[in-house]
Amino acid sequence: MPPMFLAASTPSDDSFFALVMLPLALAVIMTSLGLSLTIADFKRVFVFPKGVAIGMTNLVLISPLLAFGIAELYSLQPELAVGLVLMGAAPGGTTANLMVHLAKGDTALSVTMTAISSLAAVITVPLYLGLSIEYFDAGVGDDVSMGGVVARVFAITIIPLAIGMWLRSRNPGRAERVEPRLKKVAFGFLVIVIAGAVVSEFDVIRDNFADLALATLSLNLAAMSISYAISRVARLSDAQSTAIALELGVHNGTLAIAVASTIDSTLATPAAVYSLFMFLTAGAFARVMYRRNGVVATQPA
């Protein structure tokens, strides 16, 4: 772990983390996503509209509402409740695409959902952030400019995403060669971001760990279970249902932490704890679905 995260947190450390490390990490992550996207990934919504509609409804409506309910259920303190909703409103992450691929799910659907939800985050993240601050009466409302949050989300998601797509359109062959290496760098940044958020707010996490662990695990498991069930009831295939469930389980934690850290670092703690657990739960689900989807794929038509 880099030395900056081993030292006790100071205002200058927090500033460096929020203003430098987080935007840099998110820029790398979103650029790597852009390198993997083409316009066809957005047009694919017309190829399987049912899957995209169900998946996006889960992402932009069910997941944030679940976060509201779970924050109430566990009586989280206001700032932590807002942070949980912020994580629930975050778009799908690029790691979800990898897990869907490993689980033999519908990777194309997963990539399309990640792309569309990343664009929608410019609206959904500030919207649910504002609603949760008001609903839970968190003591950060006077310092938050929703216009500033919109601009910030746009700058740290849409711009690097567009740059990645532009680079791919200019030189597709080189983009395909660079993308796997950049994704490894992006994953490394993700680990550093999670570690940094945990260390910088260690006292808050330690004092509230039981509630945070139960709340974040409940949100993660409920979102994946409900989205998978809805997908199956809607008669989507196992592969499509796998993609939707993993998109609901593996959010863009870096974005949630980045937005939260510029408002109040305490808001970032639920996203950090959620990110610690989501790889374990989503990984276990992916392993189960790998076997199931593998059996389905080998059955004769």
Image (cartoon, rainbow, N blue to C red):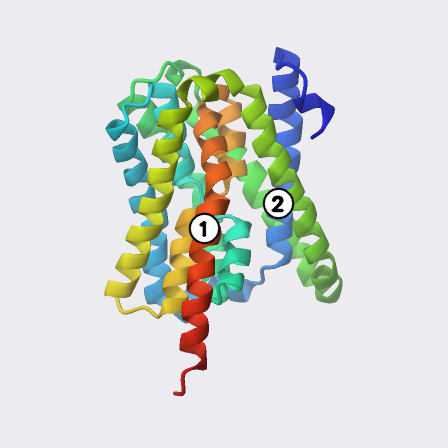
Q: Are marks 1 and 2 in contact (CB under 8 Å)?
A: no
Residue 63's mark? none
Say whether residue 215 is left or right of residue 166. Answer: left
Q: Earlier in the sequence, mark 1 or mark 2?
A: 2
Estimate the x, y position of residue 220 in percent, counting from the top left: 38, 43
Report whether residue 85 is seen. no
Q: Please name the amino acid that badge 2 sits on.
A: Ile
Give residue 171's quadrant in the image.
bottom right
Q: Which residue is mark 2?
A: 29
Residue 58: tell me if it is visible: yes
Quadrant in which residue 13 is drawn:
top right
Residue 158 lies in what quarter of the image? top right
Q: Position of residue 207 (x, y in %)?
A: 43, 17
Which image quarter holds the C terminus?
bottom left
* Residue in the picture at 60% in, 44% down: 159
Residue identifier under label 1: 282
